Amino acid sequence: MANYEYEHTVTTTAPADAVWALWSDVSRWTEWDTSLEAITLDGPFAPGSGGTMTIPGQPLITYILTEVEPGVAFSDETAIPGGVLRFGHRLTTADGLTTITHRVEIDGPPEMAKEFGPVVTEDVPEAMRALAKLAEASCRV
């Protein structure tokens, strides 16, 4: 069981494939996640591929895609000193709406996880709103 867990959900009128197009094109993540200065992916958007991300004021961070269910969900992991960050992303649809869920789990020493967790997740709601807005705009083009 993770020592820190967080989940946030937003709903959008954009179809799931519009959100998925933004998720699976890692080069576009900086358009909706303002905490990212730069991000790379070495390989396809598939389990086992990984890359690096630059967050201002932080050393270069590496991540790996651990699960990818095209059009539906993906997960990735980032090793941190003394622990691991796991990010889960899922899309569900009902009644013409798409629900976007972002989950964060931190495994590591409880004190570190409880202190680090809120820092990692503080901008998640803003990033998810921006993702939904960008997906909606892509449908109006």
Image (cartoon, helix red, strand yellow):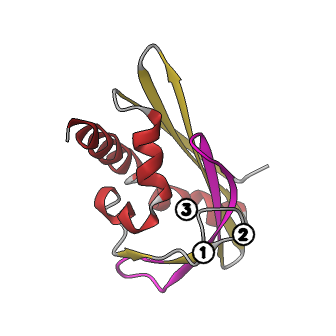
x%, y% of residue 63?
Answer: 61, 72
> In the rendered structure, which disc, 2 or 3, sits on the residue that comes first in sequence?
2
For residue 138, side relative to residue 11 (left or right): left
- The boundaries of the magenta stretch are 53-78
Task: Indicate whether residue 68 is drawn in magenta.
Answer: yes
| Residue at position x 45%, y 65% in the image | 26
Residue 86 visible? The answer is no
Above or below for 10 versus 80: above
Q: Closer to us: mark 3 or mark 1?
A: 1
Type of the residue with mark 3: Glu
- The outermost residue toward the top is 95
Tell me the SS state at disc 1.
loop
Residue located beneath label 2 in the image: 48
Tell me the SS state at disc 3.
helix
Q: Do the residues labelled 3 and 1 touch (CB within 8 Å)?
A: no
| Residue at position x 66%, y 79% in the image | 81
Residue located beneath label 1 in the image: 43
For residue 111, side relative to residue 139 (left or right): right
